[in-house]
Image: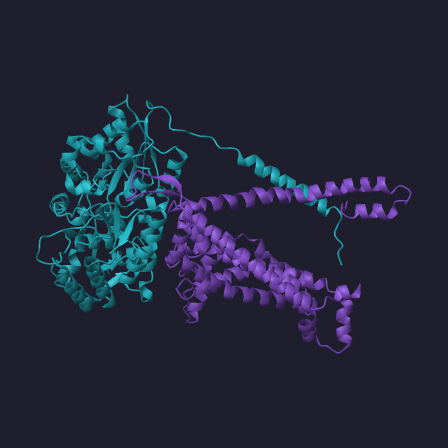
Chain colours: A cyan, B purple
Amino acid sequence: MTSRPPSRRGVLAAGLWTALAGVGATSCASASAGQGNPDGPVTFWSALRGTDTLVAKWNAIHPDDPVDYSPMTSGLAGGNAKLSNAARAGNAPDIVTIVDADLPSFAIDGVCADITDLVTPRLRTQLGPQAWTNGKLDGRVYGIPLDLGPMLLAYRTDIFDAHRIDVPTTWEEFHEAARKLKRQSGIHLTTFHPNAYNVLAGHAMQSGGRWFAIEGDSWVVDFLDEPTRRVADYWQKLMDEDLLLVAPGSSQEWMSALARGRVAAHMVGPWGLAALASSVPGTSGRWRVAPLPQWGTGKPVLGTDGVSLHAITADSPRKERAMRFLEWMSTTPEAITARLSSGRSSLFPAAKNQVEAASRQFKTDFYDGQDLYGLVTDQARLLRTGWTWGPRMQATATSLHNGLARLSYGTKITEALRTAQAETLPDMRSLGLKVRQT
Amino acid sequence: MSTSTAPSKLRTTSAPSAPTTTATRSRRPQRQAVGVLLGPFTLLLFAVFLIPVLYAVKLSFFSESHTGLGFGNAHTTFVGLRNYAAVLADPSFVQGVGTTLVYALVFIPLVLAGALALALLFDSGLVRARQLSQTVLFVPHAVPGIIATVIWLYLYTPGISPVLDLLSNADLTVNFLGLRMLIPSLVNIALWSGLGYTAVIFFAALRAIPRELIEAAQVDGAGPVRTALTIKVPLIRGTLSTVAIFTTIAALQLFTEPMLLSRATPLVGPRYTPNMYIFDAAFTRNNYGLASAASVLLLLVCCALSYVVTRGSARTARRVPNPRKARS
């Protein structure tokens, strides 16, 4: 029984043709922006706080050589994808801020230029080997390091005092302190963030692990080498004994535990100290910062937690001028003063002659007036060199986070690492890279 | 004006004295009709299906390739089956396929059986206010998948969900975003939006069954359940298998719902289903060759499945004598 109105087909046909016409009309409307001429302003994308005041300062003293700054979202939040797309489309900026872990990815994709020959001897000596290890790949420079990120231990002095806990200097003592604190008060000594591959990697760096290594013309991938396994087993044991709060970084659950004093310590690089202070302002004056515990009695060593680099894009026609700006930005006190003038950043500059200017910008009331930049200066000397990130680190990181999210369902840290490695290899192979597993 | 019936009317009314002229005159509107009706389809088929598919096949055999460590020596080359090998060796892709299969095995029987039961109920006349209840069931289908998932996310999230509040008042705690509940939660969203739509299709097919057949069954003493199971269901077998194909293909292409869930829980990773794997490969890993290879594989699986289902249903249709053919 079909009793459709006869005009249905006519209407349908007309509708289809109209839709088709619409598709055709919208498909051919794209303008190419292009890179412009070599004498135009240097373009600069950054997600770093304080870049606006920094660029304003440069433009004030160099009106003839302007820098055009646009803010962008941070890498994992979409910045990386935006940069890749812009580079493919041929309208990437001249300079871009990237996280150290993403450098190999952009270097392999041909987004970042090899700028080894543009680095002046002055810049090279100003920044030092601990910083350059983050900006170099296979001996060539792809990014100018901005800061250093030795991992530190921020802790609640009032909680430590109330339960007679000494600041641990070794991981053995740290374990003991966690046990004692949990037994006496139920407070967790610190938090394990299942969404912070950088912290786990920082611990692996400290213990001598190497997730990615370059040997000859081949990548060597091993997320479960002996040092990393030791780190994974250590944190697994603490978790199994219920000595850690397991909560994602920057989650509501973690913030509220910090604010209520249910967690007594936090491990983070220097940049995170200001972030901590603004997250839990109610606990101001009750925190101090100590060196991160060490593995044994050998020479102390530290891992890096999240530093920034500035890269010049491969297609930029203004590389020399971009480099002039970057050298000013990375080495002069006036630049770091301008960048940190908001007072809400505890970034620790890589250049030695910027440290004093930087230290004057960050008020340490939250940390009981402690001399933080003095402490970090000492700690930065212990930073390990020779760590290499992988060529698809964002994918590796999300894979690792996905595995670590299953910790509360019985997955072990070592299993999450093994899965992340297995999910990283196909990508590298399909890119034609030479890969070996040990 | 019904274009397809016009030529036949012409043919029957035309005089036998001038057969050739009427034939040419009648063929022209027919050709126009074919052009009007098939033109948009053919154009779209080429523009949004065949050409992209061929392009994806081409992309899947090429790759932005590197040598050794890969710094600064990228060039696009023919890489043969390397991308396919990489996809099939990727545990996350294989796991995504597994997840989707589990989802499909739960969802497809539920939606087909549920929709069929609803359609039979409507058809039996047992339901009061049939049009109203059909509309109410159908409305969720009009809600876009993204919006539907956002609504359900709100109901799934502890702390803001009124449903979870009610359950916790009754001392029940259910974590809809926990590891064991992920697939049931996804199936629930898909059922909510798909059940009414599928039921309407089945109902339309049931309405097309000649009433005399059903009356004959009733006269022979068959009750409503027996009529439904032995007369109505076999008669709409064709519709059932068509809907089964569409539902299977839609299930294999699961994307929107888990993509949104991945924002709410880290347990749903960016490569949770094959379609999400493709999206992740293309847009976070910038590996278009890998993404194309995975897309082509997914397309092949969908085509193969459709073929199997069509062949299977054609065979069963041949076994069941078609009553409408028998009548005429």
Q: Nearer the viewer, residue A174 or B286?
A: B286
A287 or A378: nearer the viewer: A378
Give the residue at x 16% y 40%: A359
Q: Position of residue A326 (x, y in %)?
A: 24, 32
Q: Which quadrant holds the C terminus of chain A?
A: bottom left
Q: Nearer the viewer, residue A238 or A91?
A: A91
Toward the top, the furthest residue is: A64
Q: Residue A260, percent across and down?
A: 26, 59
Where is residue A42 drawn, in percent x and y? 31, 28
- Using the image as rendered, state which of residue A263 and residue A349 is in the foreground: A349
Residue A361 visible in the displayed image = yes
Residue B133: x %, y % from top left: 64, 62
Residue drawn at the location 62% of the way across and 68% of the way down: B117
Q: Quadrant of residue B27?
A: top right
Q: Is residue B159 left or right of residue A336?
A: right
Q: Relative to B219, does residue A174 appear above or below in the rendering? A: above
Q: Quadrant of the N terminus of chain A?
A: bottom right
Taking the view exactly as shown, the residue that stands out farthest to the bottom is B221
Query: From the viewer's perspective, is residue B255 above or below residue B31?
Result: below
Q: Residue at x 29, y 50 (%)?
A: A435
B191 lies left or right of A59: right
